[in-house]
């Protein structure tokens, strides 16, 4: 018998996740596939911030959610030949039997041609996080990012540079700040754990901030918003500063409304799937920028499927630079 492994969401998250929240199980793989079915084997799995807040929508006992790049092991579906690579929302599992339906690209789609870039980039700059940066920035905002050294923020800042903006990033270590400025070409990067946000902004943006790409929420965001110029724009992408809170709805941050009113700011939240119909445009453009050397990208790779929870904790703790990935 050949078996696969999967992580079950065993106990609801409360505060920062722990090993108790997960249970590793084995399951039997089918010997063959039926008409239309595909059996996939994970090669790379993604650990993302959304997994922490999104799991509150699910009961205990379900498979942990998530996306992966997988190889087709067995196929009875001509769109997914054996040996080809797919991107699948298959959860934290080493193997997945799926029957792709027409139009259900959200569950599985063939990994696009990445022209020699690592297939794992399909979970990062050439996938959901890269598209979040591309559409979120170009459709809703511009310039300035926090959570800047991660999968989304690192691309946001580089696209903003491509578009001729002055870019300021915030990240949690001096090494990440050095990486943003020296490697990625940000104009300024500050350590939000040690630098005073107001003083940093006075130095880097003495005339104020026009646009803000918000990945973190909370006090830092309120401070940045308080430094924004007339008619400034805020793209609200995430609020990771509160994802591990026991009660996110009760988190307190300085009130932003007076500044929003007097500076007549425009703030808009988004989920990247809003641009599902343009998904491959984002991937194609980010790939072109990588090939032209205009976007640089890095990953923090954890080896071993069994280490999925640890990789998840590490990402939430800021141990990753660029995209946090698990290699099976
Ligand atoms: N709206 C949408 O459609 C999407 C939204 N998102 C959001 O974008 C944000 C970034 O995601 P992604 O790039 O994948 O993740 P990252 O690769 O940036 O990883 C998460 C990072 O967040 C930082 N972080 C952790 N805790 C805090 C905190 N309390 N305050 C500030 N920073 C913190 C850490 O870096 P550090 O060392 O700097 O602290 C960590 O490395 C998240 O909020 C996510 O939910 C992502 C995809 C789609
Ligand atoms: C307060 C929570 C904000 C979370 C913001 C965020 O990170 C959103 C990420 C989504 C993105 O917009 C598109 C996605 O793919 C991310 C979420 C995917 C959830 C899938 C859940 C279903 C499943 O896999 O079973």
Image (cartoon, rainbow, N blue to C red):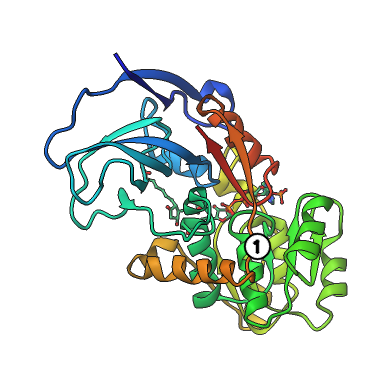
Q: Is residue 43 visible?
A: yes
Which quadrant of the view contains residue 280?
bottom left
Up/down of 109 relative to 146, above or below:
above
Q: x and y percent of residue 133 in the render?
A: 55, 65
Relative to residue 189, is residue 316 drawn left or right?
left
Relative to residue 224, is residue 28 drawn left or right?
left
Along the line of sight, which residue is nearer the eye, 109 or 252?
109
Q: x and y percent of residue 35 in the render?
A: 11, 39
**The N terminus - image quarter:** top left
Judging from the image, what secondary structure is the residue with disc 1 in? loop
Q: Which residue is outermost to the left?
A: 35
Q: x and y percent of residue 208 in the render?
A: 77, 80
Residue at 45% x, 37% y is 43
Instruction: Give the labeled residue for mark 1.
Output: 296
Along the line of sight, which residue is nearer the eye, 103 or 141?
103
Residue at 25% x, 47% y is 80
Relative to residue 67, is residue 243 drawn left or right?
right
Q: x and y percent of residue 94 in the render?
A: 40, 30
């Amino acid at each position: 018998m050949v078996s696969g492994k999967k992580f079950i969401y065993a106990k609801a998250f409360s505060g920062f996740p722990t090993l108790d929240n997960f249970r590793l199980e084995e399951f039997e793989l089918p010997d063959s596939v039926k008409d239309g079915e595909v059996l996939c084997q994970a090669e790379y799995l993604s650990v993302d911030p959304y997994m922490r807040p999104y799991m509150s929508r699910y009961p205990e006992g379900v498979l942990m959610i998530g996306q992966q790049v997988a190889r087709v092991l067995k196929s009875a579906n001509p769109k997914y030949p054996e040996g080809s690579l797919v991107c699948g929302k298959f959860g934290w599992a080493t193997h997945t039997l799926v029957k792709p339906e027409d139009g259900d690209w959200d569950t599985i789609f063939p990994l696009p041609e990445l022209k020699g870039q690592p297939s794992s980039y399909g979970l990062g700059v050439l996938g959901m996080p890269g598209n979040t940066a591309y559409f979120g920035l170009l459709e809703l905002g511009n310039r300035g990012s926090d959570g800047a050294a991660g999968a989304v923020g690192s691309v946001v800042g580089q696209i903003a540079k491509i578009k001729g903006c002055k870019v300021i990033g915030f990240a949690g270590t001096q090494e990440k700040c050095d990486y943003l400025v020296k490697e990625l070409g940000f104009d300024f990067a500050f350590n939000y754990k040690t630098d005073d946000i107001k003083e940093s902004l006075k130095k880097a943006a003495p005339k104020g901030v026009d646009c803000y790409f918000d990945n973190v929420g909370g006090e830092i965001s309120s401070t940045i918003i308080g430094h924004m110029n007339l008619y400034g724009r805020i793209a609200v992408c995430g609020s990771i500063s509160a994802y591990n809170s026991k009660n996110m709805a009760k988190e307190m941050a300085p009130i932003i409304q007076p500044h929003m009113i007097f500076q007549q700011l425009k703030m808009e939240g988004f989920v990247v799937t809003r641009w599902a119909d343009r998904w491959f445009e984002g991937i194609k453009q980010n790939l072109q920028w990588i090939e032209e050397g205009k976007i640089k990208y890095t990953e923090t790779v954890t080896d071993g499927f069994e280490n999925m929870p640890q990789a998840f904790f590490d990402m939430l703790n800021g141990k990753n630079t660029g995209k946090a990935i698990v290699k099976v």
